[in-house]
Each structure stands twice: as C-alpha cells, then as structure tokens.
C-alpha cells in the first residue's frame, strides 16, 4: 500500500526543490517519489491519499548536538561562561542516575518532536542507550552514545570507560533491526580526556564501525589549556592523535584558526554548530561561513536545556544567520538557504546519515515535517524559505513523520501519553526540589 501526501507546498531540501503543488509518495518507511503532483508517474498499487490543505512540507530537522538527559535541570544555571557554568552545575548534575537520564530524555525528545526535529545526536555520561530507547518509543530517529572522560582531568568525574563501550555494545545488540537507532563512541573533550583514552575510544569506534563524537574548541580558555599542556590547538592535537576523519562529529569548533579549518577539511570531519549555546555561555561565534567555504560540513545543534534553554532548531537557524551578519556587518555573509541546508541535509552529512535522511527524495527515509505557514501575498519559494528560517517556530508544526509514520499530529504525540509522562516526572522531582 502506498500513501500519497498531496496538496502541499513541498520543500525537498535539494537545490531548486520547491514545488507549490507538491506531493510525496511513500511506501513503508521510504519516499518512493516526490515532486510536482502533475509529474507523478502512474502507480499500479492502491494509493491512500492525504490532502495536506496547502501546508508546507519540509525535511525533518536534524539536531546534531544535544544532551537530552539533562533536561530535568533546565534553567538551573543561566550565568557564567563555560567553565564557571560547568563548575556551578557540577554538584547538581554529577550525581544524576540513569533513571534521571531517562526522565530527561523523555522531556527532551517530546520537546524536539514538537519542534519538528526528527533526528538527534545525543550525548550523555552514563546510559549510552537510554536516549535511543526513549526516542524509538516516541518514534524519533537518534544517534546516541556516551562521552568518555578521564576522571583525573575532570571535576566530579567518575570513570565511565570502558563502561560506555559496554553500554553501547549492549544498546547496539538491543536495537538490532531498529532502523531508527544508531550509536557512536566518543570522548568528552581534549581537556577532559587523556590521549590514551581518546586513542582507545577511537580504536573501538573503528573496530565497531561507529562514528566518533567529541566537543572541540568550544571556549577560548580550552584552547589555552590544550596549548599549555600539549603545545597545539585542540584540533591539531586531536588530529595528531588520529581521531579525526569523516566519521568524526565535532561539537562547537568556535575557536578554530585557518590551520585548524584546513585540518578539518582534509580529514572530512563534520561540525555541530550550536549558536544559542555558544552565545549563552559567552563562548563566541563559530566561523561557519569560513568552515563551509573550506568544504567542512556544518550542522546545527541545540546543545542542552541548561545552555540554551529550548530545543528548537528554528531558533538555531535564525540565530546562525543573524549572529554572523551582526558581527561581520555583512548582510550577505549567510542567508536562509544556508541555515535551512545546515538544519537538514548538511546536518545529515555531519552525522554520516545523508544517504538515508536530510532531504525528501526517492529512496530516502520518509522523515518530514508539515508546517502551517501562510503568507498574505501567497506562498512562493522565496517566501517559504524566508518564513522557515526567520518567521516559523514550533507553533507552526502541525505534523511530524519519521520513517513513513506520523508521530506527532494536531498537537499530540501519537506513540506515548505525553501528559501522563510529564505528570509522573514532575511528581518524582516535586519531593526533591
Ligand atoms: Zn555538548
């Protein structure tokens, strides 16, 4: 049985992919055909038809960096730069259990889906498979794992390696055959991992054919610490250790110079850019136009609800453009098209998932978002693109589909009892607050 979504303003996410009378034909989890309805080839099979009433359809948004498990602590510390902030938070977050992580993941993922996010790359310290389990239950796609750290280098650190490896292997086994869940191995950062730990993690990642995730060059002080300790920039240091290649997902990369960008371009590593988090923690603004000009793929990330505090890629799209323009005084340095690509296809490239997701086209997974945006002058490609990046928000999200299944519609998550989950989480912490 085929499903046809029609009467849609379709934005496929590909160059020139704006179709005012668009349609998407879906079979099981995949897109069979997408384009102007008038050009759809005849189908032999029966088609269930769904009229989208002229709404806008875009590829599902891809969140390349998150810490869902911390969502229970939203807004617990809103002041200070990265290191000061992390030190203030440590007493509250370093003792969190895997059950706390799970509650945070529910809150994070329910928010993400409401905000049109269909895939997220999540980081935790313990419980590498928790995000994947919750995301799969809700119906969202995930790249999950735990970031190893060296306790001797990290305040309030507890050893989580090789535990992270064991947890990840267990999760891979548990989710075998689950097309929604993928996993990675990673380290927290160059300053909180010893070189031997980073090499161990990367070796295991290669052995298991998994991506490698790490925070890099987030804050200027980080660069100074790594320079004092190893005599190189964080990026050059990681490259020397052999952990950078096309399977590497690097969060932040705010403090990268030309040499670092050259390394990133040569190794094929991808960058998860978190404009709101970087601004809130006074870290700076990543040189996104320069990185992309070098050929480095850049995706957008929300980071956690502690450093953001909402998990909304519409905001990140808008901020990614505005921050560059405000600081460069160049009104053309980045535009809506750049932001939309980073939130979709380029984000998928960063996560090594672009053969399956990131755009609406034949053969890819049917991950899409239905937006209710109208325009007083009527919808055109330019206005729709402009609205997606500068005007739209979660309030415009009417439907979210992942792998051909609607998981959010008419204000309601379809696979879980959201009000009951929220009630039970609030009840749990009420006695601890
Ligand atoms: Zn992070």
Image (tube, rainbow, N blue to C red):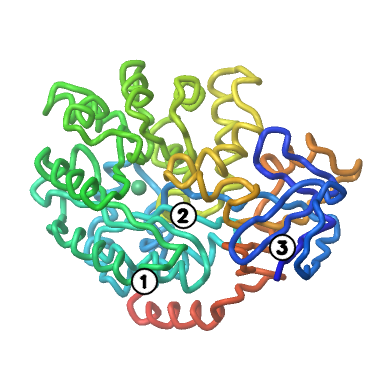
| Quadrant position of the C terminus in the picture | bottom left
Report crowding for label 2: few under 14, some 14 to 19, many 20 or more residues within 10 A (C-alpha).
many
Q: Where is mark 2, residue-wise?
A: 120
**Residue in the image at 65% along x and 20% along y:** 332
Q: Quadrant of residue 239?
A: top left
Q: Is residue 109 left or right of residue 255?
A: right
Depicted 16 relative to depicted 329: above or below: below
Mark closest to the chain's N terminus, 2 or 1? 1
Mark closest to the chain's N terminus, 3 or 2? 2
| Front tag of 2 and 1 | 2
Q: Position of residue 94 (x, y in %)?
A: 23, 61
Q: Residue placed farthest to the front in the image? A: 44
Q: Is residue 25 left or right of residue 28?
A: right
Q: Position of residue 5 (x, y in %)?
A: 77, 61
**Residue in the image at 35% along x and 26% along y:** 264
Label 2 sits on a secondary structure element that is strand
Q: Position of residue 30 (x, y in %)?
A: 61, 59
Q: Is residue 313 left or right of residue 87?
A: right
Q: Position of residue 304 (x, y in %)?
A: 41, 53
**Residue in the image at 60% along x and 26% along y:** 334
Label 1 sits on a secondary structure element that is helix
Mark 1–mark 3 CB contact (< 8 Å) = no
Q: Where is mark 1, residue-wise?
A: 102
Distance of label 1 from label 3 (alpha carbons) = 26 Å
| Quadrant position of the N terminus in the picture | bottom right
Residue 398 — which label? 3
Mark closest to the chain's N terminus, 1 or 3? 1
Distance of label 2 from label 1 (alpha carbons) = 15 Å
């Amino acid at each position: 049985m085929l499903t046809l979504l029609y009467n849609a303003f379709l934005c496929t996410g590909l160059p020139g992919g704006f179709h005012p009378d668009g349609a998407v034909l879906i079979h099981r989890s995949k897109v069979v055909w997408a384009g102007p309805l008038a050009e759809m080839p005849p189908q032999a099979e029966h088609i269930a038809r769904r009229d989208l009433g002229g709404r806008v359809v875009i590829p599902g948004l891809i969140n390349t960096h998150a810490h869902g498990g911390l969502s229970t602590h939203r807004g617990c510390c809103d002041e200070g730069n990265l290191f000061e902030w992390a030190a203030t938070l440590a007493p509250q977050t370093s003792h969190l259990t895997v059950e706390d992580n799970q509650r945070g993941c529910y809150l994070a993922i329910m928010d993400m889906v409401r905000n049109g996010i269909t895939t997220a790359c999540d980081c935790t310290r313990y419980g590498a498979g928790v995000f994947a389990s919750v995301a799969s239950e809700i119906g969202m796609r995930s790249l999950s794992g735990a970031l190893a750290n060296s306790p001797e280098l990290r305040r309030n650190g507890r050893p989580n390696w090789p535990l992270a490896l064991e947890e990840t292997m267990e999760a891979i086994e548990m989710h075998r055959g689950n097309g929604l869940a993928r996993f990675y191995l990673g380290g927290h950062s160059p300053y909180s991992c010893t070189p031997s730990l980073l090499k161990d993690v990367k070796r295991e990642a290669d052995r298991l054919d998994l991506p490698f995730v790490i925070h890099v060059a987030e804050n200027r002080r980080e660069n100074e610490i790594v320079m004092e300790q190893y005599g190189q920039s964080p990026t050059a240091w990681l490259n020397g250790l052999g952990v950078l290649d096309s399977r590497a997902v690097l969060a932040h990369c705010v403090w990268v110079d030309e040499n670092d960008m050259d390394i990133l371009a040569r190794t094929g590593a991808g960058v998860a850019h978190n404009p709101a988090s970087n601004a809130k923690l006074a870290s700076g603004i990543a040189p996104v136009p320069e990185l992309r000009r070098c050929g480095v793929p850049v995706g957008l990330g929300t980071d956690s609800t502690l450093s953001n505090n909402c998990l909304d890629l519409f905001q990140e799209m808008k901020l990614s453009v505005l921050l560059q323009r405000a600081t460069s005084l160049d009104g053309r340095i980045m535009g809506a098209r750049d932001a939309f690509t980073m939130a979709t296809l380029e984000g998928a490239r960063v996560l090594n998932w672009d053969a399956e997701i990131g755009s609406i086209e034949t053969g890819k997974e049917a991950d899409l978002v239905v937006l209710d945006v109208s325009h007083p002058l009527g919808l055109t490609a330019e206005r729709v693109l402009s609205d997606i990046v500068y005007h739209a928000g979660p309030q415009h999200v009417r439907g979210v589909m992942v792998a051909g299944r609607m998981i959010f519609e008419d204000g309601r998550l379809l696979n879980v009892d959201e009000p009951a989950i929220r009630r039970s989480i609030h009840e749990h912490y009420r006695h601890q607050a």
